[in-house]
Image (cartoon, grey):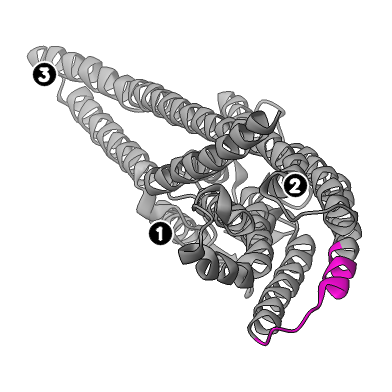
Amino acid sequence: MFHIKIYFALFFHNIAFFMSMFFFIQYSIVRKKEHLHYAVYLLTLFIYYFLAMPDLFIPMNEANSSFIASMGIFKRPVQFLSSVFYTFFVIYYLGLDSTSPKLKKFFRMLIGGYLFFSATCLALNLLNIKYDYFYFIISLLLFPVQLTVVTALLKHKVPYARFVIWGTIVVIIGSIIALGYTMYGPHVTLLERIQIFLPAQACIMIDMFLFTVAMQKKIADTEKSLINASYQRQHAVLLERERIIADLHDDVGGGLSSIRMMSDLMAQQSAAGNNSNTVSFAQKISVTAKDIAQRMHTIIWSLNIENDTLENFVEYVRQYGISFFENSGVHFQCSTDADIPLKLQLKGVLRKNLFLIIKESFHNILKHAEAKKAVVHIFIGDHILHVQVKDDGIGITNPNQFGNGLKNIKKRMDEIGGHLTITSNGGTTIKIDVAVE
């Protein structure tokens, strides 16, 4: 029985040292602070039990007796230091910076208390002042504190906290048993001291197993999330490619087909000597080519991430409106609220669809409204981007006035998850509401 206990104590020391090196290596690879603090925690445990049972490793003889006796000075200070690094480990492992700042503040206070007790024990040991009674009282008082931590973790439901909870509970049970042996049992011989620490060591080994599984699970979950994020990015790139192809086909392909058809007809009319039709086709080709160039510019503008701001969107709408209504007899105005967040990010798909809706509204104003004034007002309220296009024309006199344009507008609104309202009273007002971050 004596040999079994010694072998278990040696086995525990070897496991603690090996796992400490293992987590040091993991820290050097993944650079996660929880790995570093858990490695230091295990190393301090290894040192503590070495200081508590030096004769397990160093032969007890007259030459070594004074050296072995001096080790007791550092035993309790190192014990409190191990609690410091364990608490740091919990803070980083659970990510309390973002998940629970209040709980992190409590842990920081706990760390301060452990450091104070460690320094106090070292000073009293160096002064050769006996303080066993106070040490036992403090150790007993720390158990309710640790239970408070467990309760707080249960209450806050922090991710991965269940491993911390069960590990802490197991270590508390083992520590209470070990403290009871220390307070009421003899601990003179090596066997008696091994007997004292056996429950705590067994519970710490369970704790090591739990946290090894926990951290590997956390790493696996992180890798899984990275893989999912990579897949999402690839899927987004694929969708973006498909969207660009569709845009080029719809906006450019159709226009180029029209130009080809009109060119063929113009050539036929020219061969027949019908110059009036030739001039008409040439004008149509010019208008179509100009429209294609503008659509290409819109596609390129929407793809450029440097344009992903509300400020750029407003300026693009303003410049297009000025150019579109130039020489048309319609006075154009684009305005924003004074407090509008111009640096707000707007993705290319959102910008493109919003612009094309506004563009369709401009065409309707010029073609049907008989308006003298067109106004675009853009503002933000309650994380909603509001775009209003108003004119002072005759209003909507025909439900089919928009034709396919209204269908395209609704389709684009569905694509960006927005809400569209069209009112006609002393002119037409188109209101576009879309959520933004």
Q: Nearer the viewer, residue 411 or 391?
A: 411
The magenta segment: 127-139
Which residue is under mark 1?
Answer: 319
Task: Give the main secondary structure of the magenta stretch.
Answer: helix
- Mark 2 or 3, closer to the camera: 2
Q: Residue at (30%, 37%) from the top-left corner?
A: 296
Which image quarter holds the N terminus? top right
Q: Position of residue 96 (x, y in %)?
A: 69, 56
Residue 55 against residue 340 in the figure, above or below: above
Determine the CA span between mark 1 and mark 2. Answer: 88 Å
Q: Residue at (90%, 69%) from the top-left corner?
A: 137
Which residue is under mark 3?
Answer: 270
Label 2: few (<14), some or many (≥20) within 10 Å? some
Q: Residue at (56%, 34%) from the top-left corner?
A: 11
Amino acid residing under circle 3: Ser
Disc number at residue 192? 2
Callout 3: SS:
helix
Amino acid residing under circle 2: Glu
Sequence-first tag of 1 and 2: 2
Relative placement, left or right, of 22 versus 376 is: left
Amino acid residing under circle 1: Gln
Q: Nearer the viewer, residue 300 or 328?
A: 300
